[in-house]
Amino acid sequence: MAAVDIERGGGAGGKFPWKKQIYVFFCWIFAAFGGLMFGYDIGISGGVTAMDDFLIKFFPSVYHRKLHAREDNYCKYNDQLLQLFTSSLYIAAIFSSFAA
């Protein structure tokens, strides 16, 4: 009986057992790329907003305050426009992930 089920495509593996393996493989690939893009996004947005050249070109008032201020780990750049810029990167990532 078990030999007949295997020949017909039944049993534990089903008719196409490799379909589940391909599905799991692609889920693994998408999850890995999602983690890669999230880490890249955190590194880029965190690193770029701390660069002096970026602040001089796009946020000169923040740069001048940075030069004359005491540095605090809680709130390094107290500027709402810079915070809006940084959060817009994450909002764009959310909408583009739905499109992807």
Image (cartoon, rainbow, N blue to C red):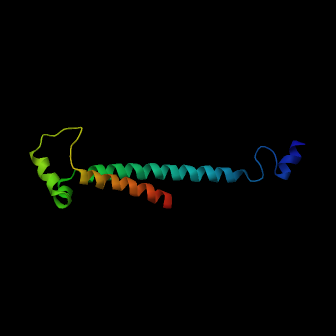
Q: Does residue 69 appear left or right of residue 85 in this picture?
A: left
Q: Does residue 2 appear left or right of residue 35 in this picture?
A: right
Q: Is residue 29 something one can see in this rendering?
A: yes
Q: Residue furthest right?
A: 1
Q: Residue drawn at (74%, 53%), measured in percent from left and top?
A: 16
User: Residue 72's x, y, as percent?
Assistant: 19, 38
User: Residue 11's x, y, as percent?
Assistant: 81, 45
Q: Residue furthest top?
A: 73
Total numbered labels: 0
Residue placed most toward the observer, 13 or 69: 69
User: Residue 93's x, y, as percent?
Assistant: 41, 56
Q: Residue drawn at (24%, 38%), measured in percent from left and top?
A: 74
Q: Quadrant of the N terminus?
A: top right
User: Residue 94's x, y, as percent?
Assistant: 44, 54
Q: Does residue 10 appear left or right of residue 67 in this picture?
A: right
Q: Is residue 100 something one can see in this rendering?
A: no
Q: Residue drawn at (86%, 47%), measured in percent from left and top?
A: 5
Q: Residue furthest left?
A: 68
Q: Residue drawn at (47%, 57%), measured in percent from left and top?
A: 97
